[in-house]
Amino acid sequence: RERALTNKLCGMADAEKQYADTMVQYVVLRKDLLKAPHNWNLGSMVAQGCHIVTKLLWELKEEDNVVKYMSDMDNMHKVTLGAKDEAELSGLEEQLKEAGIECRAWREQPENVITALATMPYPRSEIAPHMKDGGGEDGRGT
């Protein structure tokens, strides 16, 4: 009985370590663009996320974290969060860069506005503490 309990606890510890080591990429989109006066549609917002993820992964394609992340494409993990406006998104970008977190922001043209930000993939345990949104880690993601 003790052995079974020990095995179960070890399995839980392994699962927690695996979760913490999972490579995850964060994408942050401006929520205000969905409202007046901007009134962007959902498809346009999805495109902003796609643009910035593509840009970041291409620019950092030789980084070890990106290579590792892209080597298991069927099991990618992304977390999508929202920023209330451009100022909040720009502030997050500055904080991440100060913390040594690789990230990129997307500036949509011809509007010339920053719409989205993506981080390089990192182990969840390294990146999650920098990505709090309203006190909780995950927005939505897989």
Image (tube, grey):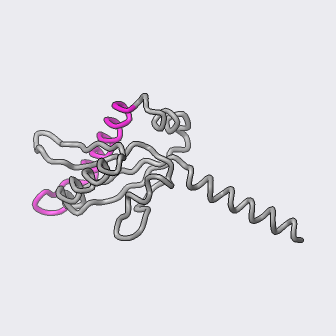
Residue at horizontal 81%, vertical 69%?
5
The answer to whether residue 103 is above or below residue 124 is above
Residue placed most toward the observer, 50 or 105: 105
Left/right of residue 80 with respect to residue 40 in the rendered view: right
The answer to whether residue 125 is above or below residue 103 is below
Left/right of residue 34 with respect to residue 137 in the rendered view: left
Residue at horizontal 50%, vertical 39%?
69
Indicate yes or no whether the magenta region holds residue 38: yes
Q: Label the magenta part by its dominant secondary structure.
A: helix
Q: Residue 71 appears at what percent x and percent y?
A: 54, 33
Say which quarter of the image contains residue 17: bottom right
Left/right of residue 104 with respect to residue 80 in the rendered view: left
Residue placed most toward the observer, 38 or 66: 66
Residue at horizontal 23%, vertical 55%?
89
Left/right of residue 53 with respect to residue 14 in the rendered view: left
Residue at horizontal 22%, vertical 59%?
88
Q: Give the range drawn in magenta.
A: 35-60
Indicate yes or no whether the magenta region holds residue 4: no
Q: Residue 81 appears at what percent x and percent y?
A: 35, 58
> Which residue, as the protein is rendered here, is positioned at the far top?
62
